[in-house]
């Protein structure tokens, strides 16, 4: 699988998202099994957050990586309302307990909130000094937020990115490329898999003996600085996600997607879900 350097570590460019995991007790074992199968397929980056099912997703991840922690690049996120000096410390320790680990590889501010960025960064640095996190970053930050952050230690910015949400191509994505800051794309096949039934993606998928999801993932990965973190519970979907790493779209494919989802021509407000 293609890899990229993130926080000084080589990670796969297709990872596993966990949004909505941990919400249904009846799905718990299937979700744990899916994450483990994803690890077997090489998708060893797992992204989660204290917000997801109010810690429930972190508990699912914790069970999935038990006895396999050394294989995993673990990413979690702190709520903005917990992003104060004391709040970050307490939130991280709760996440560590739920995840069943001593260290989170990459800890993100989920989105910008009421606390000054300098306070949150100082709290992140304290966690790093304590060994509770290895690196830190942000999520849902626009270019102005990153400029104000002005912190070379920021490892990544995680944002919404897929063919139907591509406003970041005007300024944010080029800026991150220039700064050598990988961009993590959440909802790469649309919120709730909205792009799975798209006629254009289906036509391109048929041409390549692929699926619309694989086309959407390959489209995101056409930029060398992007990491995609789709969520999947079904084994076939997991295999498709992993195999999307091998799909290369040609100029005609990209032109068709551009015709269906017009590239931005001016700066747009950052989209979030």
Image: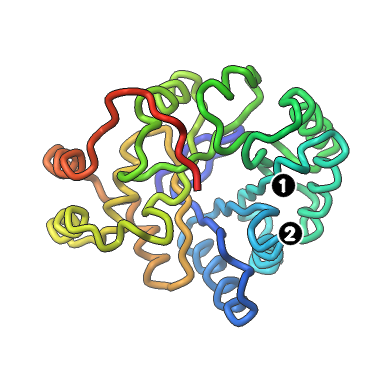
Q: Is residue 88 left or right of residue 254?
A: right
Kindly state the secondary structure of the residue where label 1 is placed: strand
Q: Residue at x 30, y 61 (%)?
A: 196
Q: Residue at x 44, y 51 (%)?
A: 187
Q: Position of residue 204 (x, y in %)?
A: 16, 54
Give the residue displayed 56% in from the left and 59% down from the top: 18
Q: Nearer the viewer, residue 171 or 154?
A: 171
Q: Which residue is mark 1?
A: 104
Residue furthest to the bottom: 26
Q: How is the rendered protein coloured?
A: rainbow
Using the rendered view, name the quadrant where residue 84 is placed: top right
The answer to whether residue 154 is above or below residue 195 is: above
Is residue 39 visible in the rendered image? The answer is: yes
Residue 234: x and y in percent read 43, 73
Q: Are marks 2 and 1 in contact (CB under 8 Å)?
A: yes
Dot label at residue 143: none
Q: Report helix, strand or loop for mark 2.
A: helix
**Residue 23 against residue 219 in the figure, above or below:** below
Instruction: Determine if residue 67 is in view.
Output: no
Left or right: 199 in relation to 155: left
Foreground residue among 212 and 128: 212
Mark number displayed over residue 99: 2
Q: Residue at x 64, y 78 (%)?
A: 25
Q: Quadrant of residue 169?
A: top left
Precedes in sequence: disc 2 or disc 1: 2
Q: Tell me how far mark 2 sits from mark 1, CA to CA.
A: 9 Å
x then y, percent, for residue 229: 48, 51
- Tell me if mark 2 has few (under 14), some (14-19) or many (20+) residues whose alpha carbon lies within 10 angstroms of its own: many
Q: Tally the numbered discs.
A: 2
Residue 13, percent across and down? Answer: 44, 45
Residue 180 versus residue 137 in the image, above or below: above
Give the class, few, some or many, for how many residues have Cα within 10 Å of label 1's Cα (few <14, many ≥20): many
């Amino acid at each position: 699988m293609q890899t990229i350097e993130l926080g000084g570590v080589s990670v796969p460019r297709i990872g596993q998202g966990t949004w909505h995991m941990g919400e249904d007790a009846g799905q718990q074992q299937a979700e744990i099994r899916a994450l483990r199968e994803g690890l077997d397929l090489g998708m060893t980056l797992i992204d989660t957050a204290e917000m997801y099912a109010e810690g429930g997703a972190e508990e699912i991840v914790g069970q999935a990586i038990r006895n396999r922690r050394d294989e995993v690049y673990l990413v979690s996120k702190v709520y903005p309302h917990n992003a104060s000096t004391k709040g970050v410390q307490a939130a991280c320790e709760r996440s560590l307990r739920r995840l069943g680990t001593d260290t989170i590889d990459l800890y993100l501010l989920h989105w910008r909130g009421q606390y000054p960025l300098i306070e949150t960064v100082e709290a992140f640095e304290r966690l790093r000094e304590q060994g509770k996190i290895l690196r830190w970053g942000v999520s849902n930050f626009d270019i102005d937020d990153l400029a104000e952050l002005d912190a070379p230690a920021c490892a990544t910015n995680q944002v919404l990115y897929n063919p139907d949400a591509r406003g970041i191509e005007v300024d944010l994505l080029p800026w991150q490329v220039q700064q050598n800051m990988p961009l993590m794309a959440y909802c790469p096949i649309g919120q709730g898999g909205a792009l799975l039934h798209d006629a254009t993606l289906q036509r391109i998928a048929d041409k390549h003996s692929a699926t619309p999801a694989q086309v959407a993932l390959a489209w995101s990965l056409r930029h060398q600085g992007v990491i995609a973190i789709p969520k999947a519970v079904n084994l076939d979907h997991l295999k498709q996600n992993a195999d999307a790493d091998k799909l290369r779209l040609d100029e005609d494919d990209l032109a068709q997607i551009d015709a269906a989802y017009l590239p931005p021509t001016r700066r747009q407000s950052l989209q979030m879900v």
